[in-house]
Amino acid sequence: MQDTVLVTGAAGFIGFHTTKALLKQGYQVIGIDNLNAYYDVNLKKARLAQLEGQDGFVFSQLDIGDLNGLVALNAEYGPFKKIIHLAAQAGVRYSLENPQAYIHSNILGHLNILELARHIDGFEHLVYASSSSVYGGNTHLPYSVKQSVDMPVSLYAATKRSDELMSHTYAHLYGIAQTGLRFFTVYGPWGRPDMAYYLFADAITRGEVIKIYNHGDMKRDFTYIDDIVDGITKALTSPPQQDQLHRVLNLGNHKSENLMAFVACLEDALGQKAEKELLPMQPGDVHETYADISETTAAIGYKPQTTIQQGLPQFVAWYKDYYKI
């Protein structure tokens, strides 16, 4: 049996798939999640049901805002020398409605994980979720980790950039090895129902109109979940070295897809055409994302494999099975 890894956000989309992969690789996984109601809790519980009962998996319902709870969990199951921190309040648009949730989970929660790691003897590596949203209104494509990211256009992005800065500080002050991963539009089976592709699938299958912002003139670097998980697990086993204990890497597909082409691919997979309503750009949104992954490939050997033509049918197959369509 390999080491024990603490995975925060284990009932979330990326956390669930990461936990599954770690268990397959022989790790012991202690998973935590607060099971908040930002989206359907039944979906989170259904993901957990896939994990519970597997050898090496323990789940605890715990909020990362609760430092005493984290310390007690480490005393019971630790020491956690490796942590994959994926718990966060997600969503750009919701940060306009409920900013306090983002400060609690993404700022206080991240600080608590750093404090936990700081007090664990022989701590090895913290891998945490950042986001492509930190690039804000940057128009220089593809997005490189060498670019300035000091002009976020949403509070969600501001909290994720804050996490990177806090992590840099803790690496400098306390010698904690850390890797921040900037995820680019992750999709796939067991995905998040607030994401555009999921909302589109819901609307198309019900014969409802889908809302397409910026009149369809949007491009995204859509990254399939298996490629993201491959990047996370590769990062975990390749911590940064002494000269630079904190690093930030892009996890994307290194391909920017036109939103309308993505919708057409989803229509093909569903076997149904969408009725579209073209709307203006939403506050906090960006026109295009595109990941430069050269540094990620050099650091951890990351090479995404999945096109949207391969990935979207996988999502649709799961979606139809899960909702009995």
Image (cartoon, rainbow, N blue to C red):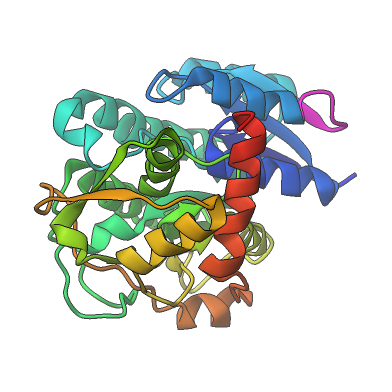
Q: Is residue 120 visible?
A: no
Who is closer to the viewer here, 95 or 241?
Answer: 95
Give the residue at x 25% y 50%.
Answer: 276
Give the residue at x 53% y 34%.
Answer: 12
Q: Position of residue 232 (x, y in %)?
A: 60, 57
Who is closer to the viewer here, 313 or 55?
Answer: 313
Q: Quadrant of residue 50?
A: top right
Q: Is residue 49 visible?
A: yes
Who is closer to the viewer here, 299 or 45?
Answer: 45
Verify whether residue 240 appears in magenta: no
Asked whether, in this view, residue 31 is left or right of residue 297, the answer is right
Figure check: 312 above or below 252 = above
Q: Position of residue 227 (x, y in %)?
A: 60, 63
Give the residue at x 71% y 30%.
Answer: 78
Q: Position of residue 9 (x, y in %)?
A: 53, 33
Verify whether residue 54 appears in magenta: yes
Q: Quadrant of residue 56?
A: top right
Number of marks in picture:
0
Dominant SS in magenta: loop
Q: Quadrant of the C terminus?
A: top right
Magenta residue span = 51-57
Q: Position of residue 260 (x, y in %)?
A: 32, 65
Figure check: 42 above or below 87 = above
Q: Quadrant of the N terminus?
A: top right
Asked whether, in this view, residue 93 is left or right of residue 311, the answer is left
Figure check: 266 above or below 155 = below
